[in-house]
Image: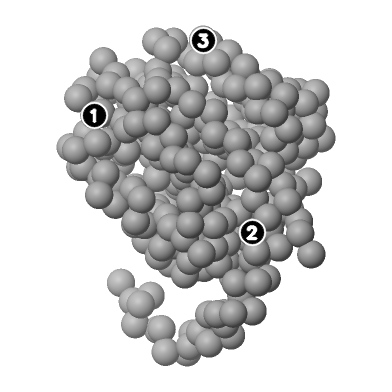
Amino acid sequence: MSRVIRAALFQTAWTGDKESMIQVHEQAARDAAAQGAQVLCFQELFYGPYFCQVQDKAFYEYAERIPDGPTVRRFQSLARELGIVLVLPMYEEEQPGVLYNTAAVIDADGSYLGKYRKTHIPQVRGFWEKFYFRPGNSGWPVFDTAVGRIGVYICYDRHFPEGWRALGLAGAEIVFNPSATSRGLSRYLWQLEQPAAAAANEYFVGAINRVGVEDLGDNDFYGTTYFVDPEAQFVGEVASDKEAELVVRDLDLAKLREVRDRWQFYRDRAPGAYGPLTAP
């Protein structure tokens, strides 16, 4: 029995200031809704530059409370107006000095469903994230939304298979992976890891990456945002590697049952044998 939802991803370049960046994303949400999209995810740290290219405490000012900060409240109103589920990857301040790389999930009626905090935090040239973020402590929540059960796994997380599996075990049907990843570093992995995770865990994945070179460094963000299905097949075309683009695709969630009936990965797991994997 077909169960089709229309889902969207938005990749774009830094505009130069927070307010205009938010306005660009508000317009993207309106455009997605006009095309019939029922759920939309933005790129990592969506309303700012990717400031982790430098280590500068001035960027702590980008952090907001979630859900009580102005950006979440603003997009709750927009979600309610448009009737669309929104995934907002943001910089979160839990309290002064306690900061996370977080995605807030808002349902189609504007209600706040919860958040995921990025678990795995890199600290390498061009990605100085430990200067800005604590490792997440949210576990791997799956959110019951108007379009189905969705999870979030943020950027560097995608290199770690354990979280992908945890989301599948929790019932995720779509996992969004908002990212800021650079052409010279990870391009060879970008169209390998998320399709492999979708196939291994038998759900849809939406992978989002920003575009362009920002004035904080030489990271060349290469876009190529896409959806991939549980058979590791791209759903439609992969987005541009240079231009802003709204990707809207129809996803038939009935395919999850079809694939899981064929490959019984969840039945055939051997969790009793995996103890060493959790050893420090």
The residue drawn where x is 43% and y is 67% is: 162
**Residue, far front:** 236
Q: Is residue 21 left or right of residue 107?
A: left
Q: Is residue 78 left or right of residue 180?
A: right
First of labels 1, 3 by sequence position: 3
**Residue 38 visible:** yes
Q: Amino acid at mark 1?
A: Asn
Residues under labels 2 and 3: Cα distance? 33 Å
**Residue 20 disc label:** 3
Location of residue 151 in the rendering, given as x and y in whole percent from the top left corner: 59, 53
Give the total of numbered labels: 3
Which residue is under mark 2? 173
Location of residue 124 in the rendering, given as x and y in whole percent from the top left corner: 20, 42
Which residue is under mark 1? 219
The residue drawn where x is 40% and y is 18% is: 14
| Quadrant location of the C terminus in the rendered image | bottom left
Q: Is residue 184 above or below residue 51?
A: below
The reply to whether callout 2 and callout 3 are in contact (CB within 8 Å) is no
**Residue 169 disc label:** none
First of labels 2, 3 by sequence position: 3
**Residue 50 visible:** no
Q: Give 99 or 109, whichever is nearer the viewer.
A: 109
Per the image, label 3 sits on a secondary structure element best described as: helix
Please rate how many residues cluster around mark 3, counting C-alpha atoms within 10 Å: few if below 14, some from 14 to 19, many from 20: some
Residue 195: name its quadrant: bottom left
